[in-house]
Image (spheres, rainbow, N blue to C red):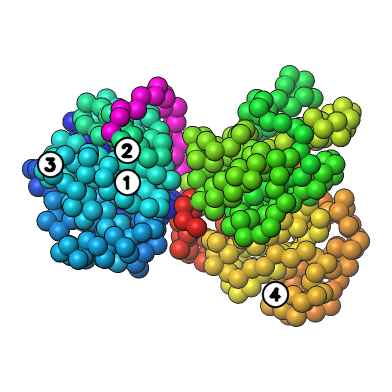
């Protein structure tokens, strides 16, 4: 949550800050702000709303500063107002601080600082940092930030600018991501690499409890004790074109259409020549002697984990359970050194998932991270890693990263089964042959977008939706409902179709669209029975089916979307695609902010 950026160099800072902030807006977008040293004077602009609105206000000032920091916010402490927007200043207005994270002991610090005469202007936790640094500032800003970082509890990535130290920016991190970049024109710090793609050529990922000073010439990193930290720099590999809409109206639509590539690259890089052997090089150190598996994740990633639970129990001889990460530590899970935990996360930074990983590690479990963004906290703290190769996802609603997660999990399940001797070479070969057809099948489905857009026109005014499915398609019903809720703000629920009669059936009337995921390979007759029950109560049935020519369908379904024939392991991904498109087109017709839906942030780094 929240995106931060800083730059010092030979170029005017303001355009660089805005370019970076727009690319970080997926992390939070309720308000934004920048602080720059314009003719060595601290100059602050803050505004509620999107970064673009702040930019419109700032650009006419024709500022020439070459050092500054910027922030885009997702509110935790204090509602989105100008006073609560970052940067926050110390009492003298000389020190400006931007922050991503939560200072857990801010009330204690605030009380202490107030007693010492500091005056607070906002309700945020961040403002204590500005006053704390002021309190420690005896002319050495780096030492003052280190002292403040030692006192602060909780998570932070912060950047500090001071009028008394006009040539450098000080940054520090614990728990929240922070990357430094060196480019031709100067030095950057930011929450995530895309913010500086095309600007910086070399990267340095700050670790927990490290600080750095940035000058136009480069940076030096230190630990909290003041010792210099040296690690090799990494090359910037991100292409700035990857963070453009490429002719699509929204990032979400572009990302939906990127799924054949995302799934293909995720699968093919893990298959050896001949595509009958799986090679997961990030798992070399993993002990395969496990007797239980937990999949932990949040939101869409949890739906991928739940899908894996269904897929894996077909091939693995041990108990498997997907658990929502924020619940994992609250339960008496059976975690021993023979437990394998798979943490699924697009960002690798989701705090609920990270805390669940730490909990599992403390109890001796082996942890595999299945993630899309490399260099993340979850990857660092895990014993092994499997990457999804979806590429950067900017739309807040996860689409291509979900299908890539399910594809990678399908492979991981087969890999584990092979290692445990639970699957024959022949079956493995058949499963892999099915999976490798997925990119083509997804392309076929994407070609049906127009038909799905027409359905959206018919239903965009609905107030509620039900999504029903059985077996491995049940998590996909949950995902269909989540996508619709997130971006269209329509109330939607996903249910196992067999559960409908135990409650949700009471909701059905002639206004209720019910999306039913129907496959002749999964309890076909039972799901047809559920469709009968919906029709008998005058509900509107939208059937996604891989048997579109079944003569019974016209009697039971008001609308039908045909899916290509595929092997069972491929079904969850294929059924996801039409629901993503349906949610997208409904949201567009309702005029919502598709890429940045209200109240959400792409990476949730609070518990
Ligand atoms: C889904 O559309 C959301 N963006 C959200 O549920 C997301 O999947 C969740 O916050 C987990 O994020 P992660 O994969 O980065 O851990």
Residue 57 rendering spot, x and y as whole percentages? 21, 56
- In the rendered structure, find residue 512 and report the number of the disc placed on it: 4
Note whether 481 is above or below 232 in the view shown: below
Residue placed under numbered mark 3 in the picture: 139
Q: Position of residue 294 (x, y in %)?
A: 70, 48
Labels 1 & 2 near each other (Cβ < 8 A): yes
**4 and 1 marks in contact (CB < 8 Å):** no
Q: Where does label 2 land, which residue?
A: 224
Task: Give the residues drawn in magenta, as a range.
Answer: 226-254
Residue at x 85%, y 41% (from the top left corner): 317
**Dot placed on the residue nearer the N-terminal end, 4 or 2:** 2
Is disc 4 in contact with disc 2, using a CB cutoff of under 8 Å?
Answer: no
Q: Nearer the viewer, mark 4 or mark 1?
A: 1
Mark 1 and mark 2 lie on one chain; the one further toward the N terminus is 1
Q: Is mark 2 within 8 Å of ligand 1?
A: no
Q: Is residue 606 left or right of residue 452?
A: left
Estimate the x, y position of residue 319 in percent, counting from the top left.
80, 48
Is residue 14 or residue 377 the one in the foreground?
377
């Amino acid at each position: 949550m929240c995106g931060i950026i800083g730059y010092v160099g030979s170029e005017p800072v303001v355009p660089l800050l805005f370019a970076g902030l727009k690319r970080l807006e997926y992390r939070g977008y309720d308000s934004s702000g920048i602080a720059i040293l314009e003719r060595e004077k601290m100059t602050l602009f803050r505004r509620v709303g999107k970064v673009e609105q702040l930019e419109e206000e700032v650009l006419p000032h024709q500022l020439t500063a070459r050092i500054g920091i910027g922030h885009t916010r997702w509110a935790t402490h204090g509602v989105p107002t100008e006073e609560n927007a970052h940067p926050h200043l110390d009492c003298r207005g000389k020190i400006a601080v931007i922050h991503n994270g939560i200072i857990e002991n801010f009330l204690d610090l605030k009380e202490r600082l107030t007693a010492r005469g500091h005056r607070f202007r906002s309700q945020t936790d961040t403002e204590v940092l500005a006053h704390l640094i002021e309190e420690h500032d005896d002319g050495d800003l780096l030492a003052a930030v280190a002292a403040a970082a030692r006192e602060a509890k909780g998570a932070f990535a912060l950047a500090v600018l001071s009028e008394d130290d006009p040539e450098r920016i000080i940054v520090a991190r614990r728990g929240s991501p922070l990357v430094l970049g060196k480019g031709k024109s100067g030095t950057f710090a930011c929450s995530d690499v895309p913010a500086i793609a095309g600007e910086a050529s070399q990267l340095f990922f700050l670790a927990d409890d490290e600080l750095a000073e940035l000058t136009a010439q480069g940076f030096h990193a230190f630990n909290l004790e003041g010792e210099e930290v040296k690690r090799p720099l990494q090359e910037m590999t991100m292409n700035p074109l990857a963070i453009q809409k490429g002719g699509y109206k929204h990032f979400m639509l572009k990302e939906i259409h990127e799924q054949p590539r995302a799934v293909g690259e995720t699968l093919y890089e893990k298959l050896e020549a001949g595509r009958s052997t799986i090679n997961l090089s990030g798992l070399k150190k993993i002990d395969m002697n496990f007797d239980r598996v937990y999949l932990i994740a949040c939101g869409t990633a949890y739906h991928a984990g739940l899908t894996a639970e269904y897929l894996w129990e077909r091939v693995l001889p041990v108990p498997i359970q997907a658990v929502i990460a924020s619940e994992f530590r609250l339960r008496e899970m059976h975690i021993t050194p023979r437990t394998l935990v798979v943490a699924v996360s697009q960002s690798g930074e989701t705090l609920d998932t990270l805390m669940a990983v730490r909990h599992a590690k403390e109890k001796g479990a082996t942890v595999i991270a299945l993630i899309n963004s490399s260099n993340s906290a979850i990857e660092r703290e895990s014993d092994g890693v499997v990457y999804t190769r979806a590429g950067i996802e900017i739309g807040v609603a996860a689409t291509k990263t979900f299908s890539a997660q399910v594809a990678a999990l399908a492979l991981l399940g087969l890999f584990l089964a092979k290692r445990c001797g639970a699957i024959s070479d022949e079956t493995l070969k058949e499963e892999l042959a099915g999976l490798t057809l997925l990119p083509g099948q997804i392309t076929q489905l994407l070609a049906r977008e127009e038909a799905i857009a027409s359905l959206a026109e018919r239903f965009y005014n609905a107030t509620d939706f039900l999504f029903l499915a059985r077996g491995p398609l049940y998590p996909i019903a949950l995902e269909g409902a989540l996508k619709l809720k997130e971006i269209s703000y329509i109330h939607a629920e996903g249910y196992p179709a067999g559960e409908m009669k135990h409650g949700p059936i009471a909701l059905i009337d002639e206004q209720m669209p019910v999306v039913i995921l129907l496959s002749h390979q999964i309890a076909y007759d039972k799901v047809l029975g559920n469709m009968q029950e919906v029709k008998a109560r005058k509900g509107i049935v939208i059937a996604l089916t891989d048997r579109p020519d079944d003569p019974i369908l016209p009697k039971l379904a008001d609308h039908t979307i045909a899916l290509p024939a595929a092997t069972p392991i491929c079904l969850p991904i294929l059924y996801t695609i039409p629901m993503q498109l349906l949610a997208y087109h409904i949201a567009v017709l309702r005029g919502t902010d598709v890429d940045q839906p209200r109240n959400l942030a792409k990476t949730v780094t609070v518990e």
